[in-house]
């Protein structure tokens, strides 16, 4: 069955509010409650009463996803069929649109001691402005190696992006980031013969860049990872017939939505600004993705109460999001980040689908346990988009 | 996505307690309760409260599996992708490790009347010791047919294994066991031309063996079934990065675990001896499979109360199994054997996963009905292994 053949157009509006890392597991220090159970969420619970609930599996049973595959699934793409490199995510994240001749890598400034051993993989999270200046200095000195153009794009704090543009390049090479302090940066290695030119260029780049930054107090080392080509993936609008607006504060998510060709403005670091923009441009789009990062961050910090507070803060913003009166409103997550586990996990995402036509559900609190009993069931996250399109009246009947 | 690429090592211990045929259906003679509902199981219920529950489907909806595919699924292999012949299961079950040149068949002694009509397919379940002597006598007389070596391995009671070793053999031939009394044994038939040599050898073997046993009072006939090659299947340790110990009393299960290259000692017929061995060797393995056969036998006998008693007996042994403090403890079954149905069935298996990180579940009794509401959901049995590996902290994140 080809979903695309069933698509039809109307004026309905679909809104996805994605609370990153929302799901949790019972925490022994808080009465074996999850963060969602502990939080006071009158607006989510009110919605839950009028919605259908369920649990979504981002990739597969037991599989903990990175943000990339987790979001692809959320956006209705089978994440097993697409792999999007970290370098590409970062490049698009800073607003750089790749061409077929480009190889992108995520770059970090780090600090090394006099023996070249890494003492800080993030160069003390140097300020964005100072970092940008160093990136520009390197860029002025190194414009080309052999016939390959060198493009550098600054990011936040210690982060930037390296793009190699030219013929005969490959993404089949290893990272130089050892992922641990106390080690020296690694030499890049070709994973197949056609990557030998790229390895040569990268080594030469690192050597020359090293010359430029060697006297920097903190940013005296460069670490590269996730070499990747421009991803080949069907644009969201083409796949689902929806004109999409993506609202996120963090570059990686913006990178992904730009790869899917969603309109993705740069709105800074304030979540409230996303909501403002959403309300202002509500008439111009069919599909809205609103990304809330803070629940994930608190989960990774292992801070149960902070995650609870962020959930409550999000809850308080729900009425404003609903004030536009969307036809289908979804609250879900990309993956779980239980504060008791302190990292991404495999636990399925609590999910709520609010629409007049959603179905018969008798649950009225938005928690992992209640979602388990929901009408939507336990489903793969990429099965959610067809359900949402159906609720929006955007799918024709299949077969006679 | 390749699960193997996500595996990582640590010191965690995973224990699977598999109660064969555990699940049941409501029995009209016992207040429409299942055996699990009727049984008094304080230890399982206590565990259920701290665990997540679910139901696992061994092969597919509505499909009643044999023990082979049911166990493969339990061990994390998609049972649709692997077929393991009965002959191979029996050969490995008696400790015979097959080579690529071997064809194995399950053999039974039977009793026939003077016209060659079967009167007992199991030769009155003659004692193991007497059976072994007859097998040895046949083996001494028939060492080779054409260029094919004949190997015989005695089993329990009327059972033994025939192995043909040589070039140009095939497993594409039919059984000689008619599966019913009152019929004559069947002639083996080639299912494809390359099996003609094998058919010729088997016929000659049966003719000569008949000469040896013709005057036996009970074991005067040989029945063969399940001709099979050495199975090609990835060893469990290679697939999941876990060093496995398999503990079972019955040969068929030992056959399967040996085919998967699990360490599988021969410990006799006593279940308590398995537990003793498990405790003694707990430090040396990562994964433990403990097989409890009696629930299935009582189910097949249609003896509701006997199955209840065996469930209660198993329940009483749980504290001893938990005394080693495993990181992940699973109680499940290979397939259901409702005593009201008196045979294997398609009903999904009640399943419990105990670990600190398992997730948010509010059910606290280990029954089919409670498992239906569990957080694990209704899943294929082969999806359980990734969940268990995740709970053991043995899976890396998938994707950037």
Image (spheres, coloured by chain):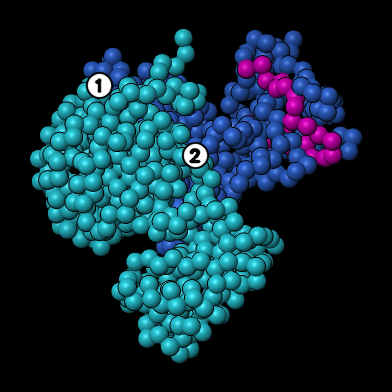
Chain colours: A cyan, B blue
Distance (Cα) linking label 1 and label 2? 29 Å
Q: Check disc 1 and report the residue beneath it.
A: A357
Q: Give the residue displayed 70% in from the left and 62% down from the top.
A: A193
Under tag 1, what secondary structure? loop
Check the picture and name the quadrant holding the C terminus of chain B.
Answer: bottom left
- Name the disc covering residue B187, or none: none
Report in which chain the residue with disc 1 lies. A
Residue located 41% across and 16% down the image: A397
The secondary structure that dominates the magenta segment is: loop
Label 2: chain? A
Horizontal side of A59 relative to A169 (left or right) equals left
With respect to residue B8, does B360 lie above or below? above
Q: Is residue B177 magenta?
A: yes
Q: Is B392 drawn above or below residue A50 in the view shown?
A: below
Residue A234 is tagged as 2
Q: Look at the picture and state if B243 lies above or below A219.
A: above
Identify the residue at horizontal 46%, vertical 86% (top origin).
A214
Residue B67 location, x and y as percent?
52, 32
Name the residue at the bottom extreme: A114
Q: Earlier in the sequence, mark 1 or mark 2?
A: 2
What is the magenta range?
A: B159-179
Location of residue A385 (image quadrant):
top left
Q: Residue A351: x and y, percent? A: 27, 37
Bin the neighbour count of mark 1 within 10 Å (Cα to Cα): few under 14, some 14-19, many 20 and up: some
- Of circles 1 and 2, which is in front? 2
Magenta stretch encompasses residue A94: no
Q: Image point 15% across, 36% down: which residue?
A: A323
């Amino acid at each position: 069955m080809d979903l695309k053949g069933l698509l039809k157009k109307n004026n309905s509006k679909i809104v996805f509010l994605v609370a990153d890392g929302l799901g949790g597991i019972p925490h022994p220090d808080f009465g074996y409650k999850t963060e969602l159970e502990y939080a006071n969420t009158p607006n989510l619970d009110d919605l839950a009463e009028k919605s259908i609930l369920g649990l979504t599996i981002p990739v597969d049973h037991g599989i903990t996803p990175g943000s990339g595959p987790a979001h692809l699934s959320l956006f209705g793409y089978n994440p097993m069929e697409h792999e999007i490199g970290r370098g590409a995510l970062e490049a698009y994240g800073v607003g750089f649109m790749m061409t077929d001749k480009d190889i992108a890598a995520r770059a970090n400034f780090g600090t090394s001691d006099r023996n070249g051993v890494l003492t800080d993989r993030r160069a003390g999270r140097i300020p964005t402005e100072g970092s940008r200046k160093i990136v520009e200095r390197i860029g002025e000195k190194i414009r080309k190696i052999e016939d390959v153009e060198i493009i550098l794009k600054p990011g936040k704090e210690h982060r930037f992006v390296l793009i190699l543009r030219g013929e005969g390049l490959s993404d089949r090479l290893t990272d130089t980031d050892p992922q641990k302090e106390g080690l020296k940066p690694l030499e890049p290695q070709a994973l197949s013969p056609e990557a030998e030119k790229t390895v040569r260029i990268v080594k030469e780049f690192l050597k020359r860049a090293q010359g430029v930054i060697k006297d920097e107090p903190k940013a005296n080392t460069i670490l590269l990872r996730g070499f990747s080509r421009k991803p080949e993936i069907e644009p969201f609008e083409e796949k689902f017939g929806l004109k999409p607006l993506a609202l996120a504060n963090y570059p990686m998510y913006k990178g992904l939505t730009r790869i899917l060709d969603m309109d993705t403005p740069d709105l800074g670091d304030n979540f409230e600004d996303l909501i403002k923009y959403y309300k202002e441009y509500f008439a111009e789009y069919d599909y809205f993705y609103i990304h809330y990062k803070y629940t994930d961050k608190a989960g990774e910090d292992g801070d149960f109460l902070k995650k609870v507070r962020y959930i409550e803060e999000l809850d308080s913003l729900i009425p404003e999001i609903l004030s536009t009166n969307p036809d289908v409103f979804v609250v879900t997550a990309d993956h779980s980040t239980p504060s008791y586990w302190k990292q991404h996990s495999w636990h399925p995402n609590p999910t709520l689908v609010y629409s007049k036509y959603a179905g018969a559900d008798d649950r009225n609190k938005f928690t992992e346990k209640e979602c388990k009993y929901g009408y939507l069931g336990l489903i793969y996250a990429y099965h959610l988009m067809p359900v949402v399109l159906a609720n929006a009246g955007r799918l024709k009947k299949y077969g006679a």
